[in-house]
Amino acid sequence: MPMPHARKIIIDTDPGQDDAVAILLALASPELDVLGITAVAGNVPLDLTARNARVICELAGRDDMPVHAGCDRPLRRRLVTAEHVHGKTGLDGITLPDPRMPLAKAHAVDFLIDTLRSQAPGSVTLCPLGPLTNIATAFARAPDIVGRVAEIVLMGGAYFEVGNITPAAEFNIYVDPEAAEIVFKSGVPLVVMPLDVTHKVLTTRQRIETFRDLGNRAGHAVASWTDFFERYDIAKYGGQGAPLHDPCVIAYLLAPDLFSGRHINVEIETKGDFTQGMTVADWWGVSGRAANALFMGEADAAGFYALLTRRIGDLP
């Protein structure tokens, strides 16, 4: 159960094995009060992301968690998905039962709008782990909610690590750059977990086996997912393991000192021939444009995995 003064969050997600680990971390952490989970099309199409979010909640013993299905395509583009990374279900690596819990009735965008209007201004943090379509649609439809958001902590973008879906762009931003542009220009305080940080929290054989050795359902699932997820990144980057991208968002909420970065200007490229979806991060402050994001650059990998292992161990 959340602590009395737990931080209220909404997780917007397109699960994805790393999204799954992020959701488990949040549900295992009493410092966070997860008001609901909103699914968006991204790593796999919406019907699968909405299914996967419920599978993860049931794995965590939280079939009471409202899961709302949202936008099934980007604002102005055809959907690009990432089965080549996550497998055909998005959660390949372990076979889990179909969810018994139903989807919540309201569309994710309506849930976002209604929740932000009903909670005290500045009391809800949004945690997007996928393309920003749901968030941008809510902001466009209900501009009054923009100023009510406490903060947005998101996984997306890249600068020094360049791109992972094109030479210049990170997947989440690339899928819906117009949505990202709306969010980055919204004026809401932004914390960005780009590839620059997520590529510093790589799995290792020992880290994966530590999850397996926890002996609980969630630990076994995390080990199996990371085993599956790892093969793609090792083949691509030639490193020792795979980055756990999305859990960085939740880890930042729990232990911000694990990360460091700079408050800088970040613009989203929506028109470039070769740089579509690039996050143009003014790391060196040369543009003269006002800072709009805390853009992370470093992470304490050992501390990150210690936190993650401890919390996953608390789950069923």
Image (tube, rainbow, N blue to C red):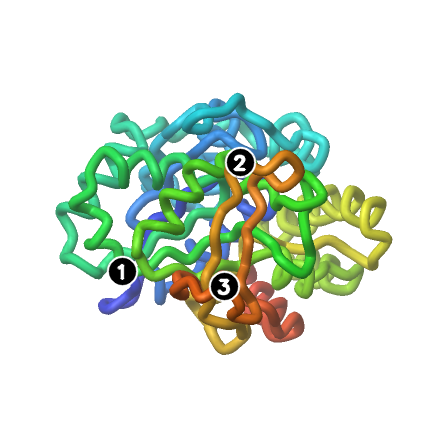
**Relative to 219, is 191 on the left or the right?**
left
| Separation (CA) of disc 3 from disc 1 | 27 Å
Residue drawn 57% across and 64% down? 308
Residue type marked 3: Ser
Locate the N terminus by quadrant.
Answer: bottom left
Q: Bin the neighbour count of mark 3 within 10 Å (Cα to Cα): few under 14, some 14-19, many 20 and up.
A: few
Residue 97 sits in quarter: top right
Residue type marked 1: Ala
Q: Give the residue at mark 1.
A: 150
Return the disc, 3 or 2, that comes first in the chain's sequence.
2
Q: Give the residue at mark 3.
A: 287
| Separation (CA) of disc 3 from disc 2 | 19 Å
Residue placed most toward the observer, 123 or 192: 192
Q: Is residue 120 visible?
A: yes
**Secondary element at image label 1:** strand
**Relative to 10, is 204 on the left or the right?**
right
**Secondary element at image label 3:** loop
Q: Give the number of the disc on residue 271.
A: 2
Residue 141 picture location, percent across and down: 23, 33
**Relative to 130, is 190 on the left or the right?**
left
Circles 2 and 1, Cβ within 8 Å, touching? The answer is no
Circles 3 and 2, Cβ within 8 Å, touching? The answer is no
Return the disc, 2 or 1, that comes first in the chain's sequence.
1
Residue drawn 65% across and 70% down? 301
Residue drawn 38% across and 64% down? 290
| Separation (CA) of disc 2 from disc 1 | 30 Å
**Secondary element at image label 2:** loop
